[in-house]
Image (spheres, rainbow, N blue to C red):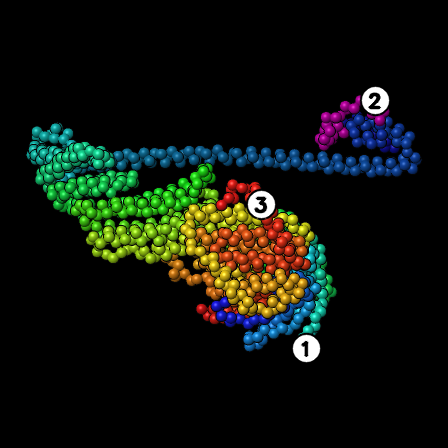
């Protein structure tokens, strides 16, 4: 609470977990976020950062039939996005289109483009083809990986292929490799698995317990960042070299060519590290959010960190501290995190209590 | 018509056919083999081309089988065939005849050619004979001259030998001058046969002069021999001396018990060194220019001394023994120096002493490190086998504490001894030694820290000590040992380092020229940081285990279809077991901290005032329409969230309470996060509520920061209510009853073990 709130805030009505950058919107910096309320009617908010960057404006407010556990924006059409939702026991995923607004602010009905049916266990997330107009989607449930072919004009989605990761693996999420479009990485209880979409086969895996989330670095070809929740059993990965988080340290950065051990470790959070996001433009900038109600900004250059943090205190002085800043001004666990791809020094964070905070890291970049 | 005409020609035709077929036909082996009866029996029109062809039969067959038209046609065909065959035959004969004619021509030509050859051969023979006669002529004409030349050559050789004999005396003189005796002897022995033959006549003068020179050479050689022999003897002497010395170095171990052997051996040693010195002195007096060799000899002596010392150091000699050895060396060196100042033995010895002392400090510290690691390892390995010891962790901690401080103190004592009882040799090294000791301690603590980190499973590339790495136990370190390490580093930081620094200061105060090389603050900092990291590691390891427990708990049932809670879930027992284990470990190792149990009361005073999120309160209020009492409770807890948020993840201290509280807090936070990922029905929610209610009573005794723990427990309930489709809490009396039942059950089951 002492961090001094530099960010721009926006309150959602209910609790929420997911926020996504609207990549296809090239004119504005906008974010999509969806609420997670068991009993009330859930909403999807389209937020836009005002031109001066001083205000978050609600561009649209749409009701969504179920509570939203995952939300991803389409990379080529700003009006299309996907959600993973839940009602009671059943899970589902769908692709939606925001209706044309014609000036009036609230047009509450979302147009459904396609429903990704066919999953037999709990859906985890939906991934879009990383860049450009492409019809491929990947959806992940607890045990299976589905590859969809989506036709937005005909409003249909068809399963192109599907494969089971095995009943023993409880998948928790994944990320699409932005460099090699045939590869996705999936997180599960005990490892990060790299899958080839052409053959629908697992090509490699990193065995680390408690991986929560992964993300790829956009700049460095082979970096995969993954995170494992700090203290405990869950982890988060961000694929840079690939960042994973695990037991003895919150965030791990992997080189995809050398999967034996991470090239760098970051301490993560004081409780679980929930998610990591690599900056889309600036190398080595990693953002992590945790259940200790904080968002940390890291500068991880793997070359510096190849030896342990504790070791060689002599050299520690001339080493740069990897933690650039810690944003503490949250009142609950932070689950949602998104960099803006249009203005890569801006990120939005979403804490469980439904508060969106947009921060700028511009002054960190100059250093 | 032709058929008829064929009969008289039969014989001729047959011969022709045979001839032709013998020439062309491939199936020569067959002719006539098929018996006639078979032919007649199986005769067909195809047999015309076989050897067993019977024209009559064929004709008959043809007439029988064919119509008139067919016969006529056959006739035409056959006539044409016969004509063809005739033409072919003609061609054949012609060709063969041609070949024969050309062969005859060739033979004729060959005959003509051979006639000319004979005359050619005769000419060749003539020419060869003439060549031979000419070469004979040349040979005879040159023969005279060649003999002449050979004669001249012999004369020249002889003259050269004579010249050599005449030159021999001067040459020998030259050799003597340049001390090339080997060459001189070679020359002389070469000339000896000549002297023997003609010495009495023509070469008399030469012989005499040479003999004189050779006698000089012989004399010289004898002296040289003597020198070498003496020198070898000296060397031998040195070796003997050294052997004696080696015996001597083994003796000092007993120095304390009996003085006699020491003095005896010392005196013998001294005597032999004296002897050696005298011998060198004599040698030097007798032979000039022998210093370099002697210097080498003296240096060898010193080197051998130090080699012996090095071996002793490897065997962990004590400083008193080291001193004794150094003293002996120094007296030897002084003795030698008197005799042989050119060798500058004192300097030489000093150099080696420097190395030796450095070795000594290094080995002392590495031994210290070994001892400590042994102590720790002993615990690591015995912990599984013999748990009967009541407080294994405490014992390990005490033992390692002792080995650190005692080991360091012993080492210091040794160094002090080394510095105090300074023989002259060490006096010059004093400052250096002090520096080394400082450095040694600094290095030692660094390494110790590195070793600890390694032991705790952190990967450290910079840690070089291969020995220790090899000895790393392959299995994972137990959490208890991490705790021991945490406390041990704290002890080193707070007690051991200040004490050692003090001692070091007093050590260098005696004659310290340089300032403290050690930077205790720096070392303390290192240990403090690793102490903290060990504590965190311990907490991490423990919370991880609990987290797995929680994960299993939440993965198993279907929370949306949960049955009504009948009792407190058994995972709570596991949780308590885990916590009990942690507490027993913590109790053994960490000190009790000051209790802050009243914090909660303090914060209770201001709960109502803090409401920073009206939104959430609104939501709670709507809910409270139905369950007013419950939601008010929630509200107050929520208020506390904002009041105390910062206190959830506080800094960990090295106290029992702090560690346990931290672990509990982290576990509860995980609990909450797991709850948030589920969706509950009413019964599921009630089950969580019941479990938490039970935990509340249990955790109360354990933890220090009661307010935070309480708050977190409430948070779990709030979260589960939020994630519940129908949040209808259990009535408090029902909960109490169930909790009581559970308590009774547990005390029944583990009556003796749970009695606190």
Q: Which residue is mark 1?
A: A103
State whether discs 2 and 3 lie on one chain: yes
Mark 1 and mark 3: span between their CA atoms?
A: 68 Å
Magenta stretch in the rendered image? B17-42
Looking at this view, name the residue that lies furthest to the right: B68
Q: Which residue is mark 2?
A: B37
Q: Secondary structure at mark 1?
A: loop
Q: Position of residue A137 (x, y in %)?
A: 66, 60
Mark 2 and mark 3: span between their CA atoms?
A: 125 Å
Q: Which residue is mark 3?
A: B744
Q: What's the residue at 90%, 32% (across, down)? A: B65
Q: Position of residue B297 (x, y in %)?
A: 18, 40
Chain ID at mark 1: A
State whether discs 1 and 3 lie on one chain: no
Mark 2 and mark 1: span between their CA atoms?
A: 120 Å
Q: Residues within 10 Å of mark 3 (few under 14, many from 20)?
A: few
Front residue of B643 and A235 = B643
Q: What's the residue at 68%, 77% (across, down)? A: A103
Chain ID at mark 3: B
Q: Position of residue A98 (x, y in %)?
A: 68, 69
* Number of the front mark, 1 or 3: 3
Q: Secondary structure at mark 3?
A: helix
């Amino acid at each position: 609470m002492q961090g001094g709130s530099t960010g721009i805030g926006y309150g959602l009505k209910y609790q929420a977990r997911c926020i996504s950058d609207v990549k296809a919107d090239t004119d504005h910096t906008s974010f999509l976020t969806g609420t997670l309320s068991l009993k009330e009617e859930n909403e999807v908010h389209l937020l836009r950062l005002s031109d001066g960057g001083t205000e978050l404006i609600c561009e649209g407010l749409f009701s969504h039939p179920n509570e939203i556990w995952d939300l991803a924006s389409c990379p080529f059409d700003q009006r299309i996005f996907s959600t993973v939702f839940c009602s009671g026991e059943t899970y589902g995923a769908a692709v939606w289109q925001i209706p044309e607004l014609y000036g009036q602010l609230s047009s509450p009905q979302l147009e459904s483009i396609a429903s990704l049916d066919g999953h037999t266990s709990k859906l985890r997330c939906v991934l879009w083809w990383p860049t450009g107009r492409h019809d491929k989607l990947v959806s992940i449930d607890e045990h299976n990986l589905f590859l969809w072919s989506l036709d937005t004009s005909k409003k249909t989605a068809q399963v192109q292929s599907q494969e089971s990761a095995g009943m023993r693996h409880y998948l928790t999420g994944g990320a699409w490799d932005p460099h090699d479009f045939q590869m996705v990485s999936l997180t599960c209880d005990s490892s990060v698995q790299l899958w080839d979409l052409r053959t629908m086969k697992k090509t490699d895996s990193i065995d680390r317990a408690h991986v929560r989330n992964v993300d790829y670095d956009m700049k460095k070809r082979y970096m995969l960042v993954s995170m494992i929740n700090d203290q405990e059993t869950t982890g988060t990965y961000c694929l840079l070299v690939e960042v994973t988080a695990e037991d003895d340290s919150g965030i791990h950065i992997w080189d995809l060519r050398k999967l034996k051990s991470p090239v760098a470790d970051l301490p993560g959070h004081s409780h679980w590290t929930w998610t990591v996001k690599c900056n889309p433009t600036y190398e080595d900038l990693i953002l992590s959010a945790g259940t200790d109600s904080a968002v940390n900004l890291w500068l991880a250059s793997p070359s510096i960190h190849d030896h342990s943090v504790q070791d060689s205190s002599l050299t520690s002085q001339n080493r740069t501290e990897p933690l650039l800043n810690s944003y503490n001004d949250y009142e609950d666990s932070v689950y949602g995190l998104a960099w803006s791809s249009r203005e890569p020094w801006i990120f939005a964070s979403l804490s469980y209590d439904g508060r969106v905070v947009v921060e700028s890291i511009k002054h960190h970049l100059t250093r | 018509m032709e058929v008829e005409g064929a009969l008289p020609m039969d014989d001729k035709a047959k011969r022709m056919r045979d001839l032709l077929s013998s020439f062309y036909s491939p199936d020569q082996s067959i002719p006539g083999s098929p018996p006639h009866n078979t032919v007649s029996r199986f005769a067909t029109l195809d047999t015309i081309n076989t050897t067993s062809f019977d024209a009559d039969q064929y004709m008959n067959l043809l007439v029988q089988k064919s119509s008139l038209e067919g016969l006529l046609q056959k006739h035409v065909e056959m006539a044409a065939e016969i004509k063809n065959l005739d033409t072919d035959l003609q061609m054949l004969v012609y060709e063969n005849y041609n070949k024969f004619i050309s062969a005859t021509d060739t033979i004729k030509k060959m005959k003509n050619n051979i006639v000319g050859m004979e005359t050619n051969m005769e000419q060749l023979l003539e020419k060869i004979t003439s060549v031979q006669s000419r070469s004979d002529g040349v040979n005879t004409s040159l023969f005279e001259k060649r003999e002449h030349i050979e004669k001249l050559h012999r004369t020249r050789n002889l003259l050269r030998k004579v010249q050599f004999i005449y030159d021999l005396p001067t040459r020998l003189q030259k050799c003597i001058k340049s001390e090339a005796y080997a060459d001189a002897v070679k020359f002389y022995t070469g000339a000896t046969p000549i002297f023997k033959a003609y010495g009495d006549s023509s070469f008399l003068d030469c012989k005499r002069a040479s003999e004189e020179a050779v006698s000089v050479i012989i004399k010289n050689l004898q002296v040289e021999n003597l020198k070498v022999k003496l020198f070898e003897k000296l060397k031998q002497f040195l070796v003997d001396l050294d052997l004696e010395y080696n015996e001597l170095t083994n003796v000092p171990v007993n120095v304390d018990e009996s003085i006699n052997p020491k003095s005896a051996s010392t005196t013998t040693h001294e005597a032999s060194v004296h002897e050696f010195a005298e011998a060198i002195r004599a040698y030097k007096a007798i032979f000039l220019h022998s210093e370099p060799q002697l210097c080498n000899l003296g240096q060898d002596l010193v080197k051998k001394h130090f080699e012996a010392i090095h071996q002793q150091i490897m065997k962990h000699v004590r400083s008193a023994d080291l001193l004794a050895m150094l003293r002996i060396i120094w007296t030897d060196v002084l003795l030698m120096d008197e005799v042989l100042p050119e060798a500058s033995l004192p300097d030489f010895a000093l150099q080696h002493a420097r190395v030796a002392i450095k070795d000594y400090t290094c080995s002392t510290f590495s031994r210290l490190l070994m001892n400590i690691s042994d102590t720790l390892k002993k615990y690591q390995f015995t912990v599984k086998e013999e748990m009967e010891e009541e407080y294994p962790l405490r014992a390990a901690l005490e033992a390692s504490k002792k080995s650190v401080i005692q080991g360091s103190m012993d080492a210091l004592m040794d160094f002090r001894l080394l510095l105090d009882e300074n023989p002259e040799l060490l006096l010059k090294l004093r400052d250096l030694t002090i520096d080394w000791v400082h450095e040694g301690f600094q290095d030692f603590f660094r390494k110790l820290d590195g070793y600890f980190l390694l032991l705790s499973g952190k990967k450290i590339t910079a840690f070089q000590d291969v020995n220790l790495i090899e000895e790393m136990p392959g299995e994972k370190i137990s959490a208890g040992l991490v705790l021991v390490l945490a406390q041990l580093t704290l002890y080193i930081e707070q007690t051991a380092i200040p004490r050692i620094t003090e001692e070091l200061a007093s050590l260098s105060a005696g004659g310290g020229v340089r300032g403290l090389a050690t930077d205790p603050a720096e070392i303390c900092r290192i240990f403090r940081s690793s102490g903290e990291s060990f504590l965190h590691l311990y907490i991490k390891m423990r919370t991880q285990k609990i987290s797995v427990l929680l994960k299993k708990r939440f993965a198993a049932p279907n929370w949306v279809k949960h049955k009504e809670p009948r009792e407190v879930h058994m995972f709570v027992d596991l949780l308590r077991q885990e916590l009990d284990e942690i507490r027993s470990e913590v109790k053994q190792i960490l000190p009790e901290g000051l209790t802050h149990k009243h914090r909660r009361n303090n914060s209770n005073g201001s709960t109502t005032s803090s409401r920073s999120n009206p939104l959430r309160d609104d939501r709670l209020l709507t809910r409270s329409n139905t369950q007013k009492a419950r939601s008010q409770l929630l509200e107050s807890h929520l208020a506390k969230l904002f009041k105390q948020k910062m206190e959830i993840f506080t800094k960990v201290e090295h106290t029992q309470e702090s560690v346990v509280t931290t672990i509990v807090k982290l576990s509860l936070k995980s609990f909450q996060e797991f709850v948030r990922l589920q969706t509950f029905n009413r019964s599921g929610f009630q089950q969580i509520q019941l479990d938490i209610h039970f935990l509340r009573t249990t955790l109360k005794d354990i933890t220090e920061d009661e307010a935070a723990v309480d708050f977190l427990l409430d948070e779990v309930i709030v979260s589960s209510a939020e994630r519940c489709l129908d949040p209808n809490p259990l009535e408090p009396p029902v909960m109490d009853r169930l909790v009581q039942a559970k308590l009774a059950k547990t005390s029944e089951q583990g009556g003796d073990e749970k009695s606190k």
